[in-house]
Amino acid sequence: MEISTILGIVIAFVFLVIGMYWGGGDISMFADASSVTITIGGTLASVFSSYSLSDFFGLPSVMANSFKRVVFDPIGGINTIVSLANIARKEGMLALEERVNDLEDDFLKKGIMLVVDGTDPELVKNIMEAEIGSLESRHNKGISMVDQIGALGPAYGMLGTLIGLIIMLGKMDDPSSLGSGMAAALITTFYGSIIANTIAIPISTKLKMASGSEVMYKEILLEGLLSIQAGENPRIIEEKLYSFLPRTAKEAPKKTDEREDR
């Protein structure tokens, strides 16, 4: 489980409650059923109308992904590719077929089988890039729904405030109610900001980072597969794949045994 997502949201709410208390307010002042109905109900209704039924009902699982800890190990993937490159160099491409069942990554398995079957390199590249593109498209659709919640929450908060102001102005004959009416009108803006800044934007950012990591990982595997198919030296493949990584990752010790390259 990705504990930072949970902790971040909880801590944000804790600070909000502390701020309310230190500001001298009564916490119950910030609870308003009509404001919740307008902001949450309106936001979800607009998202619902923007996407298909299946996409909308998949939103909870999309958001739940930000609470899951999924680690992609590019260095481990590079080491696997280099190991497969050494096997192909010593024993030939067909020897890779015997190693497929030992691989845990389905994307890599599929690529290896295409290479072993003698598929044209350009076709291998097109097939695997299409799979990466499909993955990225699915991720982007889910992320766009969360982004829309972040954009619509404050908008519906403002709509709720306008509704409250209209109601308040309609009761100008009772000046004693203006203060409480203004407070109630502003609560919807408060809820809309919470939806966007405490929930939607952090979750969207986490999902984008996870998607970027997975796409980069698969691009590294694809480049490695194409290099194996081209018969490149394992040491050259390793150096090429490490160029995908940030500098801190490149400083990690590499696993290739130079004697295997000869």
Image (cartoon, helix red, strand yellow):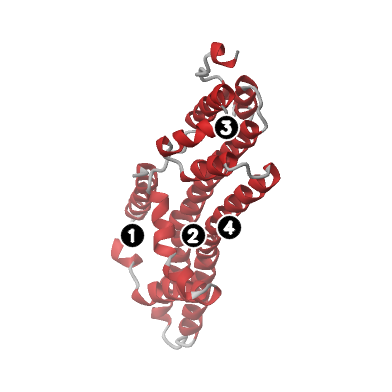
Q: Residue 7, how many percent across, how many down?
A: 35, 45
Locate the C terminus by quadrant. Answer: top right
Residue 140 visible in the picture: yes
Marked residue nearer the N-terminal end (2 or 1): 1
Q: Residue 222, how many percent across, how many down?
A: 60, 40
Residue 74 visible in the picture: no
For mark 3, what is the residue?
Answer: 93
In the image shown, does 178 or 116 lie closer to the viewer?
A: 116
Cα–Cα span, label 1 and label 3? 72 Å
Marked residue nearer the N-terminal end (3 or 2): 3
Marked residue nearer the N-terminal end (2 or 4): 4
Q: How many marks?
A: 4
Disc 2 marks which amino acid?
Ala
Locate the N terminus by quadrant. Answer: top left
Task: Classify 10 Å Cα crowding around label 3: few (below 14), some (14-19), many (20 and above).
Answer: many
Q: Which label is found at residue 46? A: none
Q: Which label is found at residue 137? A: 4
* Nearer to us: label 2 or label 4: 4
Disc 3 marks which amino acid?
Met
Marked residue nearer the N-terminal end (1 or 3): 1
